[in-house]
Amino acid sequence: MADSEIDPILTVRGLDLRFNDTEVLRDLSLDLNNRERLAVIGRSGVGKSCLLRCLATLEQPSSGDMRLLDSYYCKGGLFTEPPHLIRQQIGLVFQHFNLFPNMTVLRNITLPLERVIKSSRSVAIKKAERAAEALGISDILNKYPNSISGGQAQRVALCRALVLRPKVLLLDEVTSAVDPETSLEMVKAIDDLWKFEIGDKSEGNEPFGLIVVTHDYSFAKSFADRIAFLAGGKVVEDHQSDAFDRNIQHPHAIRYLNAIQSKALRQRQSSTEKGSVSRI
Ligand SMILES: Nc1ncnc2c1ncn2[C@@H]1O[C@H](COP(=O)(O)OP(=O)(O)OP(=O)(O)O)[C@@H](O)[C@H]1O
């Protein structure tokens, strides 16, 4: 099947989410195309994580439809398939990685394979080792999470999600807990996945899309094909990343970018001043 025939891979229409009196998402619509990387940005508390949690069936929306490829898994706010089956196809990696501290890295990766897709122990180990190699973490498979670095934990969490070969991978703020260099390594790791170095080459034509929630606008620009901006519970701006700055019109998006630019300017000025002081 040609890629174009399976676009979009994920479709969201009229998604509402409320907690008691608080309306977090309101009539939100979004598409994710096949082979696309979408960054979701917006002010703190606007509902970015809640959106990912709804997409991954960890949160029950109040209403709305969600479709993966051509089948609906949520209609009118009700999941039409058992959530654990959806979660095999829509992976979510959290900001703090949520690794099991009392299990080795290898066990952290193999457990979902055995529990979720019922792989045998030996098949799970083989898959985990292959994925770990692609992500450069083969040498830490026998370590425990408390003895690895933040960047390594990030890759382990990514590896654990990827071995299940999800159709959609959701990344929630995964670059925020690490330094910029590690964050770049993460991009490289995702690129490795993107080229489908994990798994058999013959499986390389599977549909796949990625949504990343981030506060790091420059990361969003460099990593994502498209950027969606959330305000008032919905997507109010949705543009190709290289054209995002010049196409935004919503006042919240304009204010958001102005704030980022002013901060960057202040940082540049402060480092220039420090430079001139140290030269004196
Ligand atoms: N389980 C819950 N019960 C009640 N309110 C919740 C719950 N989960 C989230 N919220 C509220 O929903 C809103 C959106 O939260 P969410 O974490 O999605 O925001 P966010 O855009 O990801 O924020 P940040 O960028 O700071 O991580 C917040 O006001 C939050 O307090």
Image (tube, helix red, strand yellow):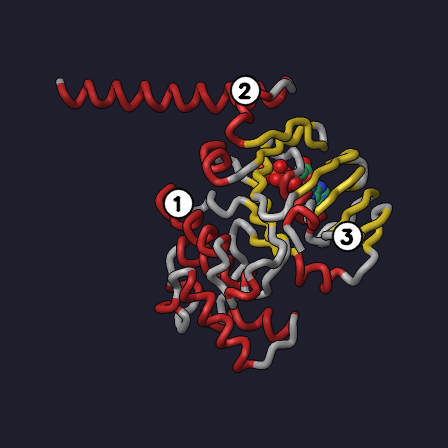
How many residues crowd mark 2 within 10 Å: few (<14), some (14–19), many (20+)?
few
Eye-nearest disc, 1 or 2: 2
Amino acid at dot 3: Asp
Eye-nearest disc, 3 or 1: 3
Residue 36 shown left or right of residue 15 in the figure: left
Residue in the picture at 65% in, 56% down = 90
Q: CA–CA distance between discs 1 and 2?
A: 25 Å
Q: Residue 229: horizontal and vertical position, in percent?
A: 62, 30
Q: Is mark 1 within 8 Å of ligand 1?
A: no
Q: CA–CA distance between discs 3 and 2?
A: 33 Å
Residue 224 shown left or right of residue 5 in the figure: left
Instruction: Give the labeled residue for mark 1.
Output: 184
Residue in the picture at 67% in, 56% down = 1
Residue in the picture at 76% in, 49% down = 67
Q: CA–CA distance between discs 3 and 1?
A: 34 Å
Instruction: Give the labeled residue for mark 2.
Output: 246
The image quadrant of residue 119 is bottom right
Tag 1 near tag 2, CB within 8 Å: no
Amino acid at dot 2: Arg
Instruction: Give the labeled residue for mark 3.
Output: 70
Q: Residue 196: horizontal and vertical position, in percent?
A: 50, 58
| Residue 219 versus residue 204 in the image, above or below | above
What element does badge 3 sit on? loop
What element does badge 1 sit on? helix
How many residues crowd mark 1 within 10 Å: few (<14), some (14–19), many (20+)?
some
**Residue 48 in view of the camera:** yes
What element does badge 2 sit on? helix
Residue found at the far left of this picture: 280
